Structure formats: structure tokens, C-alpha cells
Image (cartoon, grey):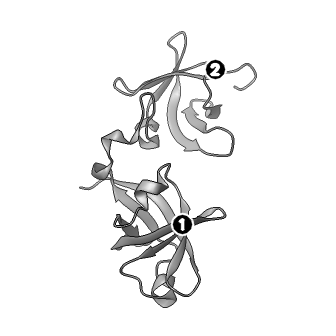
Amino acid sequence: MTDWLNVGKIVNTHGIRGEVRVISRTDFPERRYRTGAVLTAFDSSGATVSLTVSSWRQHKNFDLLTFEEIQGVTEAEALKERILKIEKSSLEDDELADGEFYYHDIIGLQAYDEAGNRIGTVKEILQPGANDVWVLDTEKGELLLPYIEDVVLSVNQRDGFITVRIPEGLE
């Protein structure tokens, strides 16, 4: 079974030449959307189509892509609402610097405080603005922690946990 990673969603067409507007979910658009990159577009039923990037540019808050397989706006229309994914196995080892990680590597890790008490599990990572927010699933409900140095103290991917300091009043 292939593991897939979401890199974006096609939300509309752009112009008449088959260009599509994508809301990206990748920190590496220059790599994911480089000429010749192959993306797999999933529709709501799970049906897929492979697409080869022929051009990429950024415009406002969107990434604009054209694909070798798409010849005009009519064909591009059929791609609306599809999710663009890559195979997890295609990730390049040199993409991350020391101390960096992919979101999918963090989601599911157990969270502990400095005293070693289990707080919960990382459920989701949000990107609302200045810094990411890590959503922890706890016994008391969801806990939103800003991903800043004073709050997320360490990430131990190998052993599957993070150590956090919950700011006063945040619980």
C-alpha cells in the first residue's frame, strides 16, 4: 500500500490555457512543482490521474500550475477540487536541515511536560500566521500550543514524543 502526502488542492482554473490555481500544503513548492515533477490528483471518490508539471508560478496566495496532460481550460475544469499528492517514498533526504521535520512525522507523537507527565497526542498542525499551532488531543479536550521555543522544548521522533512547557493560563 502506498502512503501519500497532500501537497495541495486545485481550487479553480486560471485563464484559458489550462492553468490551475492550487492552494498549497507544502513547504517546498519549488521542489514539488518543478518542471517534470509528477503529481497524482485524487478526486472525492479516490480515482486518480497522474499529472506532469510543465510550469509553475506564484500569483497572490496561489500556486499556478500547468500540466503536460492538460491542453486547455475545459480539461483543467475537470481537475477542480482534486487533491494533489506525492508518494511518501519520493521525499528527498536532503530537504530538511537538522532539527526540521515533516508534519506527518510529528502528528501522532505523544506529548509530555517537563516532569514527564503525559499530556496528550499531537493531533494536527495548524498554520494560522506567525507560527504554527500544534493541536494536542488531551483527556480534557483539545489543547492548542504555539510552536515556539519556550513551549515546544524538544522533539524526539526516534522515541515518538515531544516535551512541552504549557504557558500559564493556556490549559
Q: Is residue 68 left or right of residue 65?
A: left
In the rendered image, residue 13, in percent from the top left (x then y), is placed at 56, 79
Q: Residue at x 41, y 57 (%)?
A: 32
The answer to which of 109 and 88 lies nearer the viewer is: 88
Task: Classify 10 Å Cα crowding around label 1: few (below 14), some (14-19), many (20 and above).
Answer: some
Residue that carries the numbered disc 1 in the rendered image: 57
Q: Position of residue 152 (x, y in %)?
A: 57, 24
Residue in the image at 53% along x and 59% along y? 24
User: Mark 1: which secondary structure?
Assistant: strand
The image shows residue 114 at horizontal and vertical percentages of 55, 12
Q: Residue furthest left?
A: 1
User: What's the residue type where badge 2 is placed?
Assistant: Asp
Mark identifier at residue 9: none
Instruction: Point out the frontmost of discs 2 and 1.
Output: 1
Residue 48 sits above or below residue 109 on the image = below
For disc 2, the neighbor class at 10 Å (few under 14, some 14 to 19, many from 20) is few
- Residue 150: mark: 2
Q: Is residue 146 above or below residue 24?
A: above
Drawn side of residue 34 relative to residue 58, left or right: left
- Which residue is the extreme one toward the top? 115
Quadrant in the rendering for residue 16 = bottom right
Say whether disc 2 or disc 1 marks the residue closer to the N-terminus: 1
Cα separation, mark 2 vs mark 1, equals 36 Å
Q: Quadrant of the N terminus?
A: bottom left
Q: Find residue 29 and report its horizontal and vertical position in percent.
A: 48, 56
Image quarter of residue 130: top right
| Residue 75 vertical placement versus 7 (above, below) | below
What element does badge 2 sit on?
A: loop
Identify which residue, 56 or 150, lies in the foreground: 56
Quadrant including the C terminus: top right
Q: Identify the residue at image location x=31%, y=40%.
A: 93
- Amino acid type, residue under disc 1 in the picture: Arg
